[in-house]
Structure formats: C-alpha cells, structure tokens
Image: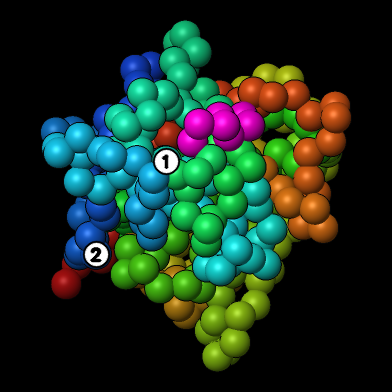
Amino acid sequence: MTDQLDSSDLIATFDTDLTAPPRLRPGKVQPMPARPLHVHDPEFSWVSGYVHALPMIGVNAPAEIRYPAWSSLGSRTIDSARGEMETYPNADAIAVMGASPFKRDHPHLSVIADHMPTQWRNTVSPRLPNEYLSGALVSYPYGQLYGVFEMRARLPRGRGLWPAFWLLPCDLSWPPEIDVMEVLGHDPTTLYTTVHTAQLGHRQHFGKAHQDVDLSRDFNDFTVDWGPEQIVFYLNRTAVFAYPTPNDLHKPCYLLLNLAVGAPGSWPGAPDAATPFPASMTVAHVRAWQRQRYVTVP
C-alpha cells in the first residue's frame, strides 16, 4: 500500500459533478444484468431510494404514476438490526409528494434528512420507519468490476446522522459490501472504512476507524481503489486502510450514497434536541475510474 493514490493509469468511466438535480429513474426497479458505468452514457439515471421498495399506501396516485414507493435498509422487518428511522422516496413518490430530499445547493447537490411531514406519515408501509424522510442515490444496474471510486462531499454534524458512500454487487447478493465512507454525526472527525464478506461461509467485516479533520467543516474526497488483489481506502487521496480483496468481491458493484438517521440503541444513536434538522450531506461529485492494469482480456 502506498500513501498517496496512484493516478498514473486511471481511465475515467463515470463523472457527475451534480451541479444540476440528478436524473431519477421512474418506475419500480426490476432486477437486470449489470450495465457498465460510462462517462458519456445518455441513458444513465439514478435510482432514488434503495432497489427494494414498498408501495406507498393511502395515496390515490395519478394514473401515470404506477409505482409510488418508499424504501429503507433500516426497516423494521427487512434489516431492523441496522436501527434506522428514515425512509427514502423513489422518483414516483417524489412526484406524488411534490417535494424531494435532493436540493441544489449551488453549485452542488444536498441530500436532505428531515422530520417526515405529517401528511405523508400514513403513506409509509408499516414495515418501514416513518419518523424521518431522507435521500439515497443508487447507480443500479450501472456498475463496475474493480476500479477507483470517489465522492467529494461535506458531511452533516449532529447525533443520529449517518452519511455513507458504498458499493454493493449488481447481482443483488449480500454480502459482500465495500463501505468507502461512514461517519457518525456526533463524531465527524472519525472516518469508518469497511469490507464486508462471506468468503468463509459466514458474514465477517474488516475495517478501520481513522481520526482526522472535522469532515463537517469542508469538502473532502472519500475514495477507494478496489483491485483484484487488495482494496485500499483513501481520505483526500491519502491511504487510511487496506485489506486483501475477498474471494466474493470479484463481480461488478454499483454505487450508493445516502444520509441515514439512527434509531435509539443503534450504532449512530438517535437524534437528540441538539441535532439540526433539516440536515444535509452536500455532494460536489461522484466519479469512477478503471485502472489499465485491472482490465482483463477474455
């Protein structure tokens, strides 16, 4: 592992500076084969919320809105161990609500977490939390096998806030998972980087907590260099952690960025009276590169 990110053989594959509101894909997400990230793909659009979503209830959606939906990885039945209290709207739910958790914060994009508006609480499935409304952007099914992935962002401060930038397999399996960045709002000077794997037949995770600057005060680069032999994590292009690539992380992965809100007893804890709402994670860009030496010839 070298201290500084080697940029000598990087080939740009994806670059969005998020100076305009993200293009969101309508309709319910259907499983499909991985599509390559490409810097000039005119068909690329983000999924708002997670891939697995549940319908809104109690709303008479316009006829053209076929799949208004909410999603959460912190739902009470899907993954309650994560302990989250936010729910994410998909593009159709955003259209129904006439409001969005994504806001242009010139010249960047802010992902907003706030208290769930009273008029929308009853539209959330009982299987999902409805205390907070927040945003997640997902590149599925656009993904990549190996490469360098980066988000430049300013993170929120406040107990219970839980921003993240991560990768999941395009075949929708789990684990594995690469957590490029997780930060807990009550301690914005500590960056958590983690590799999740089931290569030994059971779930394991390996990571490091790296203490540095206050990540809520300014923009910082959160980067991972994922290769066939090792995964190296960087903060502002300086290495903070490395781990050998598990044998279940040799398949394309898609990108996710989100701002979660913790529940009582969870890792980030729940918000307290001092937690500022609305809270925002402001994103300057999301980029991906491939390394020439990672490109294999069939």
Which labelled disc corresponds to residue 31? 2
- What is the x, y in percent for residue 150? 48, 39
- What is the x, y in percent for residue 129? 59, 51
Asked whether, in this view, residue 112 is left or right of residue 33, the answer is right
Q: Answer yes or no: is residue 101 visible.
A: yes
Mark 1 vs mark 2, CA separation in Å: 19 Å
- What is the x, y in percent for residue 17? 38, 23
Q: Which residue is mark 1?
A: 89
Q: Which quarter of the rendered picture does the C terminus lie within?
A: bottom left
The residue that appears at 20% across and 39% down in the rendered structure is 65
Q: Quadrant of residue 82?
A: bottom right
In terms of depth relative to the viewer, which is nearer, 226 or 114? 114
Q: Amino acid at mark 1?
A: Pro
Badge 1 crowding class, 10 Å Cα cut-off, few under 14, some 14 to 19, many 20 or more, is many
SS of the residue under disc 2: loop
Magenta span contains residue 179: no
Asked whether, in this view, residue 135 is left or right of residue 38, the answer is right
Q: Nearer the viewer, mark 1 or mark 2?
A: 1
Q: Amino acid at mark 2?
A: Pro
Instruction: Report the span colored magenta.
Output: 113-120
Asked whether, in this view, residue 33 is left or right of residue 86, the answer is left
Asked whether, in this view, residue 160 is left or right of residue 54, the answer is right
The residue that appears at 53% across and 40% down in the rendered structure is 121
How many numbered circles does the render carry? 2
The residue that appears at 40% across and 73% down in the rendered structure is 173
- What is the x, y in percent for residue 41? 16, 37
Q: Quadrant of residue 64?
A: top left
Magenta span contains residue 119: yes
